[in-house]
Image (cartoon, helix red, strand yellow):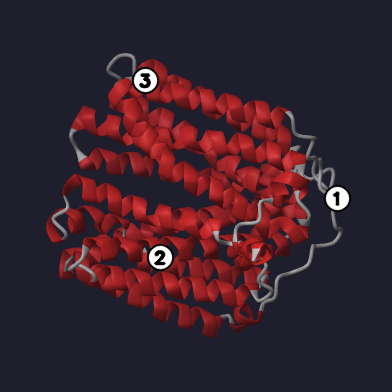
Amino acid sequence: MTGRLRRILVDVSPLRDFPAYRRLWLGQSINVLGTQVTRVALPYQVYVLTHSTLAIAGLTLVQLVPILLFSLGGGSLADVVDRRRLLLVTQTALALTSLALAIVSLGTPDLPVLFAIAFVAAAFGSIDQPTRASAIPRLVPAHRLAQAIAVNQLAFNAGSIIGPAIGGVLLAGVGVSGAYAVDVVTYGVSIVAILGLPPIPPVVAGGRAGLAAIRESLAFVRTRRIILSTFAIDLNAMIFGMPTALFPALALDVFRAGPVGVGLLNAAPALGAFVATFLSGLVTRLRRIGRGIIVAVLIWGGAIALFGISTFSFPLALLFLAIAGGADVLSAVLRSTLVQLTTPDELRGRVSAIHIVVVTSGPRIGDIEAAAVASVVGAQLSAISGGLLCILGVAGVARLFPELDRKLRPDAPAPALEPAR
């Protein structure tokens, strides 16, 4: 019974077996709490200053633009420098942006100042993310990578549940400046953890970052249909099936659940993702990784459609959102594993950056799509139609990329690397 339970639960053995990965994970686990606090505090502060939802939309745009502008360049840089040193630079810069927010928030800051700091933070974050993603395969061997990615998702989703709650308490107790100060402290923990890592130099010496390097990664992705298939199926799920923009209208006008209902609708997918990651042991051992991705996205689309149908019961609607969140995180684990193991290390930073652009832009386009459809047919039908279109889209992706369904978990790309300790 114990052995069977271990196969079902998330495999945390990478934390035990690979000390360098454990240090990176511990620092990130603390830091994600602070990051989530800031993600609650900054929109809250903008709204208190302006009482305008358009201002919050402007903040979202300010944060999206640098991701689109700098992610590919950040990935290019991660492939030609020591990734440990680059993480130290980005984490230090991000800590300074949170410190700047804490200082300016001691008074009444102008909106352009907050937007400028948010832009700089998003720019350094767009370099930090592909660097961190491409560092993990150097700290964990290929056959354990899926387990390590699942453990990463466990920390992220736990932080996505706990962090906003801590943020609300901090905003009420110490204000926005104090909330940002807590984020600075968590960055300090992350920096200390990174200082304990071994060097992670590029495998191929002498490479140069720049447009030519970015073009090389784009050419690589274009010729790897299996990677393109993971991007296509994720964009399909997020553009058609992402219901986040509908939550305020559904909570206030359909479920009559008030502001608390808005919070619960946003928390339900994260809770489902956390539970699914905790029970991801069997999924991370899947050999038919492509079919696992297809099934997970089908469950996502079906759960979103059922969420839209369940307007007669708020608890049932929350349950379907939790199921959707669980399916989404399992799809993310499998897709990330496939992309990382299909990509040689000298390209991992750049391909990780392309992956991040896809997973970042898809939900935002999905919010626009859901809101536009809702303006014509209503929020409920928008959610239902989005889930159904997602399912139809999966069929289209499977037909366009038949190799995805046949894809087995790839072996380590040559040359195989010993994990750093």
Separation (CA) of disc 3 from disc 2: 36 Å
Q: Earlier in the sequence, mark 3 or mark 1?
A: 3
Q: Which residue is mark 3?
A: 177
In the picture of the structure, the residue carrying the numbered disc 1 is 418
Query: Quick one: SS at disc 2?
Result: helix
Residue in the image at 42% along x and 40% along y:
162
The disc at residue 323 is: 2
Residue 273 visible in rendering? yes
Q: Position of residue 381 (x, y in %)?
A: 21, 72
Amino acid at pointer 3: Ser
Among numbered discs 3 and 2, the one appearing first in the sequence: 3
For the residue labelled by badge 1, is the local secondary structure a helix, a strand or a loop?
A: loop
Q: Is residue 386 left or right of residue 328?
A: left
Q: Amino acid at mark 2?
A: Ile
Q: Position of residue 321 (x, y in %)?
A: 35, 62
Q: Is residue 401 toward the left or the right of residue 244 in the image? A: right
- Relative to 178, is 257 above or below? below
Residue 142 in which image quadrant: bottom right
